[in-house]
Image (cartoon, rainbow, N blue to C red):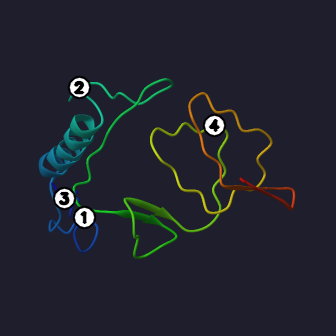
Amino acid sequence: MAKLGINTGSAPNDGTGDGLKVGGGKVNTNFDEIYSAIGDGTTLRIGTGSTCAITVGESQVGIGSTIPAHLLDVRGGIGVTDISISGIATVVDLRGVTAIDATTTATIYQVIMDSILFRSP
């Protein structure tokens, strides 16, 4: 569903906008959609230690990019404190890494730390 906007009219108190009942109904419908998407319809599942999955369909998301090539395409720097990757990850440039701890099998092809380039054999 697309977001429902409240018609505020052309001028204050001119009677052309949505009334209180219609406007409140639109607000409730918008919140119902949010609670259904990231909760169980009544309670939100977002918080410390919680996860949620939102299916966007075929849409893709770009941050700093108008034409993302992947499901999530970020152009620019990203700051990460902790990261957990399941599967194969391709990293083009990794800077500022102080430690790499692999709890499973990992293959590292190239890491740049403080302008020193490390390559795998």
User: Looking at the image, do the residues carrying marks 1 and 2 touch, with CB atoms under 8 Å apart?
Assistant: no
Closer to the observer: label 2 or label 4?
4
Query: In the figure, is residue 70 to the left or right of 80?
Result: left
Query: In the figure, is residue 111 to the left or right of 91?
Result: right
Q: Which mark is residue 82?
A: 4
Q: What amino acid type should be assigned to the residue bearing mark 1?
A: Thr
Q: Residue at x 54, y 56 (%)?
A: 90
Q: Secondary structure at mark 2?
A: loop
Q: Which residue is mark 3?
A: 2
Q: Secondary structure at mark 4?
A: loop
User: Residue 30 versus residue 70: which sits nearer the camera?
Assistant: 70
Check disc 1: other Cα within 10 Å, few if <14, some if 14-19, many if 20+: some
Check disc 2: other Cα within 10 Å, few if <14, some if 14-19, many if 20+: few
User: Looking at the image, do the residues carrying marks 1 and 3 touch, with CB atoms under 8 Å apart?
Assistant: no
Q: Earlier in the sequence, mark 2 or mark 4?
A: 2
Closer to the observer: label 1 or label 2?
2
Q: Which mark is residue 45?
A: none
Query: In the figure, is residue 88 to the left or right of 108?
Result: left
- Distance CA(mark 3)–CA(mark 2): 20 Å
- Furthest toward the front, the residue is 121
Q: Earlier in the sequence, mark 1 or mark 3?
A: 3
- Distance CA(mark 1)–CA(mark 3): 18 Å
Check disc 4: other Cα within 10 Å, few if <14, some if 14-19, many if 20+: few
- Distance CA(mark 2)–CA(mark 4): 31 Å
Closer to the observer: label 1 or label 3?
3
User: Residue 52 versus residue 108: which sits nearer the camera?
Assistant: 108
Closer to the observer: label 1 or label 4?
4
- Distance CA(mark 1)–CA(mark 4): 45 Å
Q: Secondary structure at mark 1?
A: loop
Q: Which mark is residue 42?
A: 2
Q: Which residue is mark 1?
A: 8
